[in-house]
Image: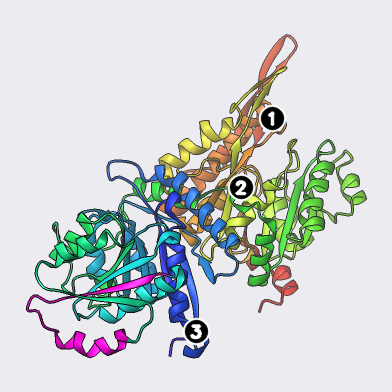
Amino acid sequence: MKQTYQIMLPITQVDRAEMLLPLATAWLRQMSTPAKGTRGEIILIGAVTVPKDQSLSIGAQSAQGLRAVMNSIRNRYTDLPLRVKATVQVSYEPWQEVLQAIHAEEPDLILLDWNGDPAALIMGVPLAEVLSETPCELALVRPTDWNKIDRILLPIRGGPYTKLAVNFSLAVAEMTDAEITVMYASSRGNLDQPYASYLPLLRNIDRIKRHITIVGDVVDEVLSQADQHELIVMGASSRPGKIGPEPLGPIASRIATESSIGLVLLKSPRAFMPISTRPSSVPSSVPVLVDKWFAENTFDASEFDDIDRLIDLKRARNVSISLALPALNEEATVGKVIRVIRTALMQKHPLLDEIVLIDSGSDDRTREIARRLGVPVYIHQEILPECGARTGKGEALWKSLHVTHGDLIAWIDTDIVNIHPRFVYGVIGPLLHSDRIQFVKGFYRRPLKVGDKTQAGGGGRVTELVARPLINLFFPELSGLIQPLSGEYAGWRSALEQVPFFTGYGVETGLLIDLHEKFGLRGIAQVDLEERVHHNQPLDALSRMSFAIIQVIVARLEDRHKINLLAEINRNMKIVRHEPGRYYLDLEEIGDLQRPPMIQIDEYRRARSIS
């Protein structure tokens, strides 16, 4: 026997998100009482409908708005048993994806916001489809001001939804302290047997103050009484929904169209098409899939600035979180980075369990500053000595997996001038909120300083001139990543330990490609971290970075297509050297080596007792 009575509340508009909550609460109290031995739960799920002539990516802002509203509702109504689904569905027909969630969650009732127009689309599909496909009880609601309801009109005919309509009216009446008027519709002037058997029960309900028998035009009589009431509650047609102006049946359609007060139309479950036989609503073309991913998996750091909420999620999942700081000669900024993050996310709010510095052989005061601040310092060339030592940031990140302990690992660069806790909690937030997301990348605006002037958005030159064009060309599934090369990202250890790491500049590109290959696009998310100010690199350094990234792209193309494109000589790059009075070419070897997945390293497996 099911012990939890569940109401699913699909939210489609930010400004109407709370209008159905009082109704859901009232019905939940009616259906989940200690006497019945059940408890209740309200599931909030967001759905954004995008016009079919537009890109799904335009739904990103609406999705963020819905997530913010649903989280705000959960935080403000702490006395209610609310559960918020992490993903807001963005689609041309999000009803199909909401229907998938309905079949997965198996709620008892669906509450849908509706404008009362029988011809209106609901989440991109005709009302008839919603009526015929919903596998549980359904309430279509044209909301009203629940605080101003004094009289409820209940038209019934003794059909299959009579009991549901009566109980729903009673729930609303208890919530609003309203009276109920029962109208029985009969074209013959006598009582049909279903209603006759139900009448004694209705006569004993205190909330029902009047009984009216209709003989004649049902709609005219209901509409005449509607002027004296603030809400109509009635059953929809028991016939399967049909495409056209009257999917609810002629009586309910006319009442919905010609009345202007609040309205609740109810439907009980009926036979429905098995979910396995439905055509997939997920678009198949890569550009549309990317647009959909962009809309659903692009977050803003402000969505996760409730650190205590993140801590609650962390404790509920019983996980630990590590922050690793890769560094090379960052004495000017590393101290502030450590102080700001440790104060906010360890001392004031215990979100992080550890912060470690992974140094790559600094010859300034970087390590001294970190140690003085009480942060464990590791020199990456000394970690896993049996594996040897390579140069490069990717090597430091790979080896940080061995010396950190968290189930979730975050990395941020140590050259951030405008450091803020959002650089850390922003990339951690989506991982704690979603069971599906495995890896999160940060993105931001990067001002470029040229002399004494700063160009807004001028940074990220390698990203825009090399990385994104090549990704669009060869790995278009990842083309929605705004800054694939950003140094602020986080992931679950269980995912990160399964993929190889390139040792140098190509580490970010390689991680994205490999994690996408293993966990799919829906396993990756990105977060807006606002603005990031750091020290811009000179052009010759960016040239080397670009050369290494191109090699990673080519190497992954070789893996994908089983061809050999990159000879050893291709790792040598001609560098133009400038000296007073002359310039010349110098040959420099630039190429990322590849470390195997950490899970394959014996010492790592022994340290974690992996058999």
Task: Identify the secondary structure beneath mark 2.
Answer: helix
Residue annotated with mark 3: 33
> In the image, which disc is placed on residue 302?
2
* Part of the protein shown in magenta: 178-203
* 456 inside magenta stretch: no
Question: Which is more N-terminal, label 2 or label 1?
Answer: 2
> In the image, which disc is placed on residue 537?
1
**Marks 1 and 3: which is nearer the front?**
3
User: Position of 522 compared to 597: left or right?
Assistant: left
* 198 inside magenta stretch: yes
Q: Is residue 296 visible?
A: yes
Amino acid under disc 2 = Ser
Q: Marks 1 and 2, Cα distance to the nearest angstrom?
A: 29 Å
Q: Nearer the viewer, residue 604 or 462?
A: 462
Q: Is residue 242 visible?
A: no
In the displayed image of the protein, which residue is found farthest to the left?
A: 188
Residue 329 in percent (x, y) is at 81, 39
Amino acid under disc 1 = Gln
Residue at 92% across, 49% down: 372
Please, is residue 549 above or below residue 303 in the view? above
Q: State the quadrant of the N terminus.
A: bottom left
Identify the image quadrant of residue 256. Answer: bottom left
Image marks 2 and 3: residues in contact by CB distance under 8 Å: no
Q: Nearer the viewer, residue 399 or 411?
A: 411
Residue at 76% across, 43% down: 414
In this figure, which colouring scheme has been used for the structure?
Answer: rainbow
Label 2, residues with CA under 10 Å away: few <14, some 14-19, many ≥20: some
Identify the image quadrant of residue 592. Answer: top right
Residue 270 in percent (x, y) is at 24, 78
**Marks 2 and 3: which is nearer the front?**
3
